[in-house]
Image: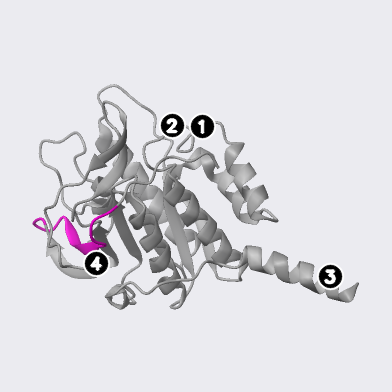
Amino acid sequence: MIAALLAASLHVAALNAPAECHSVPGSEALWRDDVRYVFVGETHGTTEAPAAFADLVCAALEQGPVTVSVEYPVQMQPTLDAFMAADSDTAARAALAAYGYGPFVHHDGRGSGAMLDLLLRLRGMAKAGQDLTLVASVPDSPRVEGFRQSYSEMDRAVLWGRQAMARPQARVLALVGRVHAEKVRRVGSPLGLPAAAHIRPEETLSLPLAHQGGEAWMCLDECGAAPIPTTDDLAARGVVLAPQQNGRFDGLLALGPVTASPPVKP
Protein backbone atom coordinates (compact mmCIF):
# COMPACT_ATOMS: atom_id res chain seq x y z
CA MET A 1 0.00 0.00 0.00
CA ILE A 2 2.71 2.49 1.02
CA ALA A 3 4.74 1.60 -2.07
CA ALA A 4 1.70 2.16 -4.28
CA LEU A 5 0.99 5.55 -2.69
CA LEU A 6 4.63 6.58 -3.07
CA ALA A 7 4.63 5.51 -6.71
CA ALA A 8 1.45 7.49 -7.31
CA SER A 9 2.85 10.61 -5.67
CA LEU A 10 6.05 10.33 -7.69
CA HIS A 11 3.96 10.00 -10.85
CA VAL A 12 2.04 13.18 -10.00
CA ALA A 13 5.30 15.00 -9.24
CA ALA A 14 6.73 13.90 -12.57
CA LEU A 15 3.64 15.19 -14.38
CA ASN A 16 4.00 18.58 -12.67
CA ALA A 17 7.79 18.84 -13.13
CA PRO A 18 8.91 21.65 -15.43
CA ALA A 19 10.46 20.76 -18.77
CA GLU A 20 14.23 20.90 -18.94
CA CYS A 21 15.58 24.39 -19.46
CA HIS A 22 18.21 25.12 -22.08
CA SER A 23 20.79 27.87 -21.99
CA VAL A 24 20.29 30.70 -24.49
CA PRO A 25 23.75 31.98 -25.50
CA GLY A 26 24.30 35.58 -24.45
CA SER A 27 21.23 35.76 -22.21
CA GLU A 28 23.33 36.55 -19.13
CA ALA A 29 23.65 40.11 -20.47
CA LEU A 30 19.92 40.67 -19.98
CA TRP A 31 19.77 40.38 -16.22
CA ARG A 32 21.18 43.76 -15.23
CA ASP A 33 19.87 45.34 -12.05
CA ASP A 34 18.71 48.44 -13.93
CA VAL A 35 16.61 46.46 -16.42
CA ARG A 36 13.05 46.01 -15.21
CA TYR A 37 11.49 44.85 -18.50
CA VAL A 38 12.71 42.43 -21.15
CA PHE A 39 10.56 42.41 -24.27
CA VAL A 40 10.75 39.65 -26.88
CA GLY A 41 9.07 40.70 -30.10
CA GLU A 42 8.17 37.51 -31.92
CA THR A 43 6.73 36.62 -35.28
CA HIS A 44 3.61 34.72 -34.22
CA GLY A 45 3.28 31.11 -35.27
CA THR A 46 6.81 29.71 -34.93
CA THR A 47 7.92 26.68 -32.94
CA GLU A 48 11.20 28.21 -31.80
CA ALA A 49 10.27 31.62 -30.35
CA PRO A 50 7.96 30.40 -27.54
CA ALA A 51 10.45 27.65 -26.63
CA ALA A 52 13.34 30.11 -26.43
CA PHE A 53 11.20 32.53 -24.42
CA ALA A 54 10.52 29.76 -21.89
CA ASP A 55 14.28 29.20 -21.63
CA LEU A 56 14.77 32.93 -21.00
CA VAL A 57 12.18 32.77 -18.21
CA CYS A 58 14.14 29.86 -16.70
CA ALA A 59 17.32 31.92 -16.76
CA ALA A 60 15.60 34.99 -15.30
CA LEU A 61 14.19 32.93 -12.42
CA GLU A 62 17.76 32.10 -11.40
CA GLN A 63 18.15 35.84 -10.73
CA GLY A 64 14.88 36.37 -8.85
CA PRO A 65 11.07 36.56 -9.21
CA VAL A 66 9.58 36.93 -12.68
CA THR A 67 6.28 38.26 -13.99
CA VAL A 68 5.58 36.70 -17.39
CA SER A 69 3.36 38.85 -19.61
CA VAL A 70 1.81 37.11 -22.62
CA GLU A 71 -0.13 38.63 -25.50
CA TYR A 72 -3.58 37.45 -24.50
CA PRO A 73 -6.58 39.68 -23.71
CA VAL A 74 -7.03 40.82 -20.12
CA GLN A 75 -10.47 39.19 -20.15
CA MET A 76 -8.62 35.88 -20.28
CA GLN A 77 -6.83 36.45 -16.94
CA PRO A 78 -9.25 34.34 -14.84
CA THR A 79 -8.71 31.50 -17.36
CA LEU A 80 -4.94 31.85 -17.06
CA ASP A 81 -5.26 31.83 -13.27
CA ALA A 82 -7.33 28.64 -13.42
CA PHE A 83 -4.82 27.12 -15.83
CA MET A 84 -1.91 27.81 -13.47
CA ALA A 85 -3.77 26.62 -10.37
CA ALA A 86 -5.18 23.40 -11.86
CA ASP A 87 -4.29 20.13 -10.15
CA SER A 88 -3.12 18.46 -13.36
CA ASP A 89 -2.08 19.33 -16.90
CA THR A 90 -5.30 17.69 -18.09
CA ALA A 91 -7.36 20.04 -15.92
CA ALA A 92 -5.21 22.96 -17.02
CA ARG A 93 -5.87 22.20 -20.70
CA ALA A 94 -9.57 21.92 -19.91
CA ALA A 95 -9.51 25.40 -18.35
CA LEU A 96 -8.06 26.84 -21.57
CA ALA A 97 -10.53 24.91 -23.72
CA ALA A 98 -13.43 26.32 -21.72
CA TYR A 99 -12.56 29.88 -22.78
CA GLY A 100 -14.75 30.51 -25.81
CA TYR A 101 -12.83 33.39 -27.38
CA GLY A 102 -9.29 34.56 -27.94
CA PRO A 103 -6.13 33.02 -29.38
CA PHE A 104 -7.09 29.36 -29.11
CA VAL A 105 -10.24 29.98 -31.16
CA HIS A 106 -9.24 32.74 -33.59
CA HIS A 107 -5.86 31.48 -34.70
CA ASP A 108 -3.20 34.07 -35.48
CA GLY A 109 -0.20 32.15 -34.12
CA ARG A 110 -0.87 32.93 -30.45
CA GLY A 111 -2.91 29.74 -30.16
CA SER A 112 -0.24 27.48 -31.62
CA GLY A 113 1.01 24.19 -30.29
CA ALA A 114 4.25 25.96 -29.37
CA MET A 115 2.35 28.56 -27.32
CA LEU A 116 0.47 25.82 -25.47
CA ASP A 117 3.82 24.15 -24.75
CA LEU A 118 5.13 27.48 -23.42
CA LEU A 119 2.15 27.85 -21.08
CA LEU A 120 2.57 24.30 -19.83
CA ARG A 121 6.27 24.92 -19.17
CA LEU A 122 5.47 28.11 -17.25
CA ARG A 123 2.89 26.22 -15.23
CA GLY A 124 5.48 23.53 -14.49
CA MET A 125 7.96 26.13 -13.24
CA ALA A 126 5.36 27.63 -10.90
CA LYS A 127 4.24 24.20 -9.67
CA ALA A 128 7.89 23.41 -8.90
CA GLY A 129 7.97 26.36 -6.51
CA GLN A 130 9.47 29.04 -8.74
CA ASP A 131 8.37 32.63 -8.03
CA LEU A 132 6.54 33.17 -11.31
CA THR A 133 3.30 34.98 -12.11
CA LEU A 134 1.55 34.73 -15.49
CA VAL A 135 -0.44 37.76 -16.69
CA ALA A 136 -2.30 38.83 -19.84
CA SER A 137 -1.12 41.97 -21.60
CA VAL A 138 -3.68 42.96 -24.27
CA PRO A 139 -5.83 45.79 -22.90
CA ASP A 140 -9.58 46.08 -23.29
CA SER A 141 -9.22 49.33 -25.23
CA PRO A 142 -12.46 50.66 -26.76
CA ARG A 143 -12.57 51.42 -30.47
CA VAL A 144 -13.38 55.12 -30.69
CA GLU A 145 -13.63 56.93 -33.99
CA GLY A 146 -10.67 59.25 -34.53
CA PHE A 147 -8.47 57.46 -31.98
CA ARG A 148 -5.91 55.29 -33.72
CA GLN A 149 -3.91 52.24 -32.62
CA SER A 150 -1.39 54.45 -30.82
CA TYR A 151 -3.89 54.75 -27.96
CA SER A 152 -4.13 50.99 -27.46
CA GLU A 153 -0.32 50.88 -27.54
CA MET A 154 -0.31 53.39 -24.69
CA ASP A 155 -2.87 51.31 -22.80
CA ARG A 156 -0.68 48.23 -23.25
CA ALA A 157 2.30 50.06 -21.75
CA VAL A 158 0.13 51.11 -18.80
CA LEU A 159 -0.73 47.44 -18.22
CA TRP A 160 2.96 46.52 -18.20
CA GLY A 161 3.63 49.30 -15.72
CA ARG A 162 0.86 48.07 -13.43
CA GLN A 163 2.19 44.52 -13.68
CA ALA A 164 5.63 45.75 -12.64
CA MET A 165 4.29 47.82 -9.74
CA ALA A 166 2.16 44.90 -8.50
CA ARG A 167 5.39 42.91 -8.00
CA PRO A 168 8.18 45.49 -7.70
CA GLN A 169 10.69 42.81 -6.74
CA ALA A 170 10.07 40.92 -10.00
CA ARG A 171 11.48 41.37 -13.49
CA VAL A 172 8.83 41.55 -16.26
CA LEU A 173 9.41 39.32 -19.29
CA ALA A 174 6.92 40.01 -22.07
CA LEU A 175 6.35 37.97 -25.23
CA VAL A 176 4.54 40.12 -27.80
CA GLY A 177 4.22 40.67 -31.50
CA ARG A 178 7.34 42.25 -32.93
CA VAL A 179 5.86 45.70 -33.57
CA HIS A 180 4.72 46.22 -29.96
CA ALA A 181 8.30 45.72 -28.73
CA GLU A 182 9.73 48.58 -30.81
CA LYS A 183 11.22 51.54 -28.92
CA VAL A 184 11.08 54.25 -31.60
CA ARG A 185 8.13 56.24 -32.95
CA ARG A 186 6.73 55.14 -36.30
CA VAL A 187 6.32 58.42 -38.17
CA GLY A 188 3.18 58.53 -40.27
CA SER A 189 1.91 55.17 -39.04
CA PRO A 190 -1.41 54.63 -37.19
CA LEU A 191 0.71 52.81 -34.62
CA GLY A 192 2.52 56.01 -33.70
CA LEU A 193 4.50 55.22 -30.57
CA PRO A 194 4.73 51.43 -30.01
CA ALA A 195 3.94 50.09 -26.55
CA ALA A 196 7.55 49.50 -25.45
CA ALA A 197 8.46 53.06 -26.46
CA HIS A 198 6.15 54.44 -23.76
CA ILE A 199 8.36 53.02 -21.00
CA ARG A 200 11.58 54.65 -19.83
CA PRO A 201 14.14 53.18 -22.25
CA GLU A 202 16.85 52.77 -19.60
CA GLU A 203 14.62 50.24 -17.82
CA THR A 204 13.97 48.11 -20.89
CA LEU A 205 15.72 45.74 -23.24
CA SER A 206 13.84 44.80 -26.38
CA LEU A 207 14.76 41.93 -28.69
CA PRO A 208 12.93 40.90 -31.86
CA LEU A 209 13.07 37.40 -33.27
CA ALA A 210 15.81 37.61 -35.90
CA HIS A 211 14.65 37.14 -39.48
CA GLN A 212 16.81 34.20 -40.53
CA GLY A 213 14.43 32.38 -42.83
CA GLY A 214 12.11 29.46 -42.32
CA GLU A 215 8.33 29.55 -41.90
CA ALA A 216 5.64 30.69 -39.46
CA TRP A 217 1.96 29.79 -39.26
CA MET A 218 0.04 32.86 -40.42
CA CYS A 219 -3.46 33.73 -41.59
CA LEU A 220 -3.07 35.97 -44.63
CA ASP A 221 -5.32 35.22 -47.62
CA GLU A 222 -5.37 31.69 -46.26
CA CYS A 223 -4.03 30.13 -43.06
CA GLY A 224 -0.89 28.05 -43.24
CA ALA A 225 2.90 28.07 -43.24
CA ALA A 226 4.27 31.30 -44.71
CA PRO A 227 7.92 32.17 -45.42
CA ILE A 228 9.98 34.34 -43.06
CA PRO A 229 12.38 36.75 -44.80
CA THR A 230 16.11 36.46 -44.39
CA THR A 231 17.31 39.92 -43.45
CA ASP A 232 19.56 39.22 -40.45
CA ASP A 233 22.92 37.51 -40.10
CA LEU A 234 22.35 33.80 -40.66
CA ALA A 235 25.32 32.90 -38.45
CA ALA A 236 24.05 34.75 -35.35
CA ARG A 237 22.67 32.67 -32.48
CA GLY A 238 21.22 33.50 -29.08
CA VAL A 239 20.92 36.96 -27.55
CA VAL A 240 22.87 39.55 -29.50
CA LEU A 241 22.93 42.95 -27.77
CA ALA A 242 23.62 45.62 -30.38
CA PRO A 243 21.23 48.38 -31.51
CA GLN A 244 19.04 47.35 -34.44
CA GLN A 245 17.03 49.29 -37.02
CA ASN A 246 18.05 52.78 -35.92
CA GLY A 247 17.27 52.14 -32.28
CA ARG A 248 13.99 50.27 -32.65
CA PHE A 249 15.49 47.35 -30.75
CA ASP A 250 18.39 46.78 -28.36
CA GLY A 251 19.49 43.56 -30.03
CA LEU A 252 18.24 40.31 -31.51
CA LEU A 253 17.06 36.90 -30.39
CA ALA A 254 18.66 34.79 -33.11
CA LEU A 255 17.33 31.23 -33.34
CA GLY A 256 18.23 30.39 -36.94
CA PRO A 257 15.62 29.36 -39.54
CA VAL A 258 12.29 28.77 -37.81
CA THR A 259 9.50 26.25 -38.36
CA ALA A 260 5.75 26.83 -38.39
CA SER A 261 3.66 25.78 -35.39
CA PRO A 262 0.02 25.16 -36.37
CA PRO A 263 -2.93 25.99 -34.13
CA VAL A 264 -4.02 23.55 -31.48
CA LYS A 265 -7.18 23.05 -29.44
CA PRO A 266 -6.09 22.89 -25.80
Q: Nearer the viewer, residue 223 or 67?
A: 223
State the separation of the CA atoms marked 1 and 4.
36 Å
Instruction: Work out whether residue 185 or residue 14 is closer to the camera in this orientation and state it.
Output: 14
Could you say which disc has been placed on residue 5 in the image? 3
According to the picture, the residue beneath numbered tag 2 turns out to be 106
Write down the residue under mark 4: 202
Q: Amino acid at mark 1?
A: Tyr
Image location of residue 18, percent across then percent down: 55, 67
Coordinates of residue 73 in the picture (x, y in percent): 46, 40
Inspect the image, locate mark 2, and give the three-letter code of the amino acid beneath it: His
Sequence-first disc among 2 and 4: 2
- The reply to whether callout 2 and callout 1 are in contact (CB within 8 Å) is yes
248 relative position to 223: left or right = left
Mark 3 or 1, nearer chain start? 3
Alpha carbons under labels 2 and 3: distance apart: 42 Å
Residue in view at x 34 percent, y 45 percent:
45
Earlier in the chain: of badge 2 and badge 3, it is 3
Label 4: how many Cα within 10 Å (few below 14, some 14–19, many 20+)? few
Left or right: residue 67 versus residue 9 is left
Magenta part of the protein: which range?
245-258
Residue 101's mark?
1
Q: Earlier in the sequence, mark 3 or mark 4?
A: 3
